[in-house]
Amino acid sequence: MKNIFSPVYRQDYIQGFSNGLNPYLKIKENQNDAYVFGFNQGRLDYERMNGKVAYGIPKLIVTNKVLEDFLLAGMLGISINDDDYTAFQIDVISKWYQSGIEKYNPRQSSYLLGILEENGIDII
């Protein structure tokens, strides 16, 4: 069994994972096990949020950061713009947004909006 805790394994895994998140890249030939495993995990993560690469690459790419923004929008009761997302992506986004709505607290939202406004940050 390979030492999965070694810095070399970790570096190859992370390189493979980051390449797997890019839908325009294909797995390179003759890569070690760590890179291949990382690439496959990265591709699974990408496809979980954006749909299968085989079905086409969407105009906008959904990432964890994008999903967190939609969650926050739901928590603050802010309407969202889902233009240019695919039906698959909208389904994923709506689950995160709905989760935010379930956590919506008008009192907390008004405090946060007040703090943002004091610092010159406008929420559209």
Image: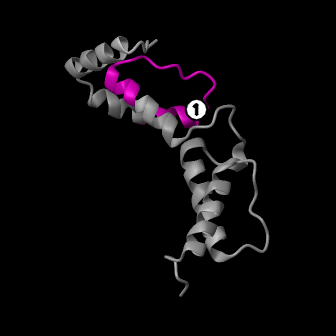
Q: On the rendered structure, is 116 left or right of 86?
A: left
Which amino acid, mark 1?
Answer: Ala
Q: On the rendered structure, is 21 left or right of 49?
A: right
Q: On the rendered structure, is 63 left or right of 25?
A: left
Residue that numbered label 1 is attached to: 87
Mark yes or no: residue 94 visible.
Answer: no
Element marked by disc 1 = helix
Front residue of 22/9: it is 9
Residue at 26% across, 15% down: 110
Q: Could you say where residue 124 lies in the image, as x and y percent from the top left?
A: 46, 12
Q: Could you say where residue 71 lies in the image, as x and y percent from the top left?
A: 39, 32
* Residue that lies at the very extreme toward the right in this rendered image: 29
18 inside magenta stretch:
no
Front residue of 115/32: it is 115
Residue at 60% across, 29% down: 85
Residue at 50% across, 38% down: 65
Which residues fall within the magenta stretch?
A: 72-95
Q: Could you say where residue 11 lies in the image, as x and y percent from the top left?
A: 60, 67
The quadrant where residue 107 appears: top left
Q: Identify whether 36 is placed above or below 67.
A: below
Mark yes or no: residue 119 visible.
Answer: yes
Q: Identify whether 41 is placed above or below 1.
A: above
* Residue that lies at the very extreme toward the left in this rendered image: 107
| Mark 1 surroundings within 10 Å by alpha-carbon count, few (fewer than 14), some (14 through 19), many (20 or more) | few
Q: Could you say where residue 120 lies in the image, as x and y percent from the top left?
A: 42, 12
Q: On the rendered structure, is 97 left or right of 85?
A: left
